[in-house]
Every structure is written in C-alpha cells, then in structure tokens.
Amino acid sequence: MAVEQPLSASAATPGDQTRIHNIGYRNYDGPRLGRSYATRSLYSQSLRGAYGLGRSIKSKVLPMLLFVVMCVPAAIMVAVAVATKAKELPADYTRYAIIMQAVISLYVASQAPQSVSRDLRFKTVPLYFSRPIETADYVRAKYAALASAMFVLTAAPLIVLYVGALLAKLDFAHQTKGFAQGLVSVALLSLLFAGIGLVIASVTPRRGFGIAAVIAVLTISYGAVSTLQAIADAQNSTGAIPWIGLFSPVTLIDGVQSAFLGASSAFPGAVGPTNGEGAVYVLVVLGLIAACYGLLMRRYKKVGL
Amino acid sequence: MYDPTVARLTYRALLGRRRALILGALPLLLIVISVVVRALAGADDQTAANLLGGLALATMVPIIGVIAGTGAIGPEIDDGSVVYLLSKPLKRPTIIFTKLIVAIAVTMVFSALPTLIAGFILNGNGQQIAVAYTVAALVSSIAYAALFLLLGTVSRHAVVFGLVYALVWEALFGSLVPGARTLSVQQWSLAVAHKVAGGDLVTSDVGLTTATVFLVAVTVLATWYAGQKLRSLTLAGEE
C-alpha cells in the first residue's frame, strides 16, 4: 500500500497538468441575429429561389418564362384598349387569373417541389433545424415565400392592366375598385394554391413526381368539376352548379370572387353562388388554407429527425 | 430487344410503394365521376362523349403518360443510379425499348382500361363510344409513352416540359389556334377513334392517314432518338 500510493499520486500529477491550452481564440459575444433573422433569410432565399435568382441559368428559364407568358396577354389587352379607345378593358381584373389558370398551375407545380422536395431529398432539413429556427418557422417561411412568389406572378399582370387602363383614361374610380378586388382575389388564390402545392410536394422527395402530382390534383379536379357543372347546366339543375364548384381550387376562387368581389362567374350559364353560398365558399377556402398549414406542420414535426 | 430484368426493375420503380396508389387514384376518380353522372343524368351519348373526350382522353391519359413515361427513366438519371444499369452488357436501345414497353403497359392499364369501364358505365357502349375512346386511349398511350420517355432522357425538367406540351399546347393552343391541332397526339388518336366509332360524336381535325403516319413516325423516332441519347449520356450534378 505504501508503495502504491506515490505511484498513484505521480500518475495523478500529469492529469492535473493536462489542460486545453488557451491559444487566444475568443468567444463570440456580439449580438446574435437569432430566430427571426434566420426565418427571414429562409423566406427571402426561398422567394428568390422561386424565380431562379441565385440559382443556375437553367433554373431561371422556366419561372421567368411563365412570368412573361403571364404578363404578355395583359400587355396585349392594354394595347388593344388604348388603340381602340375602349370604355372597358377586354377582361375584368378578377377574371384574368381564371383565364390564365393553366400557367398559374404550372408555376405552382414546378416551384413547390423545387422549394421543399430538394431539402427532403438531400436531407438538408435537419441542418435547418440545427439552427435556431423551429418547425413552425420553417413551414411559415416556405409557405410565405411560395405564396408571395405566386402573388407576384398573379398581381404583376393586374398592375399592367391597371396602369394601362389609367393611361387609356378609363374611369379612375371604377378601375381602382376593380383593381383592388382583383388583388384580394389573387391574394386568396396565391395562399390556396401555394398551400396545396406545398402539402403535396412535402410528401415526396422526388421532384418530378411532385410536379406531376400537383398538376394532377389541380387540373383533374378542375376538369371533373367543370364537366359535372356542364352536365348539371344541361340538365337545368342550376341549383347544383355552385355546390359542385366547391370541389376544385379554381372554381372555389371563382365562386368567392363572384359572390363578394363583383366578378362575373365563369361557371356554365354564369350562375355564380348567392351570398349565402358565397359564405360557404369563403369558409371552405379559409378552411383549406388552415388545413394545408396544419398538414405541413404535422409533416415537419417528424421529418428528417 | 426485351430484357425481363430491366422490365422488372422499371415496374418496381413505377409502381413501388405508394406510387401505384396515386396512379390508381386518377382512374378511380374517373369511374366515380361516371357513376355519379350516370345516376344524375342517365345514359346519354353526348354526355358520355363529352366526359370521355374532355376528362379521360384530354387530361387523364397525358398525365398518366407523363408520370409513366418520364418516371420510367427520369429518376434513375436524376439520382445517377442509371450508371449501374448502363454498365451492364446490355445494348442501350434494348434498355430504352424495354422501358418503353413497360411505360406503355402502365399507361394503358391505368388509362385505357378505366376509360373502357367508364364508357360502359356511362352509356353501355352505345354507338361504340366506349370502345372508340378506349382505342384512342390505347393508341395515344403508345405515342405519349414514347414521347415522354424521350423527354426523360433529354432533360432534367422532363415532367414540366411534358406537362407544358400536354396542357398548354394540346389544350390551350389547340383550342385557340386550329393549326396546332394537327400536331397533337390527342387529335391523332381521335382520328383513329373516329374510324372505329364511325358516327359524328367522335370527331378529329386530322385525317386518318395523316394521323397514322404521324403516330408511327413520332413513336419510332422518339424511341430511336432516346436510344441515341442514352448512348452518349453524361451525368450532370444537381443544379
């Protein structure tokens, strides 16, 4: 025992001396940008990414092309209105998005998977969550970014129409009212479409498959609903037309704006929903938006951890 | 020209796990809608023709064609696993041909079969409408699968371009510019369907001879060029 003690004591001494040398690195004690800054960065990067900014040339082609395709008919309409000195624009502000719905669907179908599927596929979602942002921040930033991108896409032609209408010296008050109603309608449309697109895209890590799934949901539901409406119209059961319209995103927006935003309905026979039915439309739209948000939150509670 | 192993792998990639469910949801929806329409409106030849032409042939067949055609090769090229397939002692055209057969089979099963069932539900094959649209769906399945398989080998954004063709060119341009209808798979297959049905309910803007020539030419050329593309395939990184 007496022999061992000094041994253990001498073994302990180097342990005491062992320490990580302070070689002059300093702790960061400046201001931390924090959670809201990280969320804002994610938002702005996703928004830029939705138009291919900050990505390769190839990724810019499609969103920019769709943006141009979206605006050109508006410019043509303005040119026609100015040249013919018309009293009204060829298309209502609220009607424009319904006419161009194929382009809008293609945009949301191509950009929603771009926004979320690649994060899933390359397993970068855990890296986001190792930053101070939380599930809700990620979902909100992505949702807000895609909705804003959609709003830019759908509102830009309206601005073209509005400016053109003012240049053509159309009635200022009337045009401003129509423009405001159009903006409210496309804002709702952006939120709804972005939500549906993101929910579908967040399920699959395959980009191509996500695109096809989003398009399938948007166009097949519209095709089915408009076919059923046409049949109901032919059967003279006009009461059923607004209720059938509840089952596809485009007709939902159409119904809301023809009930409350002074639009003429694109339904067969131009039978828009009444105010009571319109309230159901608004409730369904808001419910769908909330449901999309809830589903995204549920999806990202588990993902990548 | 046909390799069972490649075929098995492609079937699994196309129909594995949840994908078959999503592919199956579209035909199911068509059948549900036709049951509803039959219950609401009764058997009516014009309604049946509208529904089968507007929903089944114009929307469902192209979308399933895009999913099957690009899905047969696109994901493999995308994640780079196609090199393992290409390094096997198989001719590249054989790979393309096998994948084409699989894509055609999947498109036919998920689009032509439900069209036939929906047609029989809608009006019990009155005036040969169900059979005519089924033939159109079968014919266009072949052309769409070949076309979209080619797109899958050419571009990484094959799905988008395929959908742009199917929805913007055929649906939007086709309804605005009559000339665009001459270059549309849908109209070619309708010409064949017109021959089968014989009546005025199924019409096409293209003659039968033109349609047949175009259909065969597009299918053969697309398959041949896809084989050529695969021979000189370069793998690119993710953008």
Image (cartoon, rainbow, N blue to C red):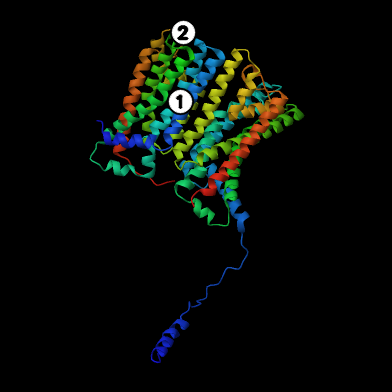
Q: Residue furthest right?
A: A173
Q: Which residue is mark 1?
A: B27
Crowd class of label 1 (few under 14; some 14 to 19; many from 20; radius 10 Å): many
Q: Residue furthest bottom?
A: A2
Q: Residue furthest front?
A: A1
Residue A250's spot in the image, x, y percent?
Answer: 59, 28
Marks 2 and 1, how far apart at CA: 26 Å
Which residue is found at the position 39% from the left and 27% from the top?
B107
Disc 1, SS: helix
Crowd class of label 2 (few under 14; some 14 to 19; many from 20; radius 10 Å): few
**Image height of A236 relative to A200, above or below:** above
Under mark 2, the amino acid is Asp
User: Does residue A73 appear in this view?
Assistant: no
Q: Which residue is mark 2?
A: B200
Residue B113's quadrant in the figure? top left
Q: Is residue A203 left or right of residue A294?
A: left
Q: Is residue B163 left or right of residue A90?
A: left
State which chain disc 1 sits on: B
Residue A297's quadrant in the figure? top right
Disc 2, SS: loop
Residue A154's spot in the image, x, y percent?
Answer: 61, 34
**Image height of B10 relative to B49, above or below:** below
| Mark earlier in primary sequence (2, 1) | 1
Under mark 1, the amino acid is Pro
**Image height of A36 relative to B44, above or below:** below
Residue A9's quadrant in the figure? bottom left
Which residue is found at the position 60% from the left and 50% from the top?
A137
User: Does residue A229 appear in this view?
Assistant: yes
Q: Nearer the viewer, residue B42 or B63?
A: B42
Q: Nearer the viewer, residue B155 or A197?
A: A197
- The numbered dot on residue B213 is none
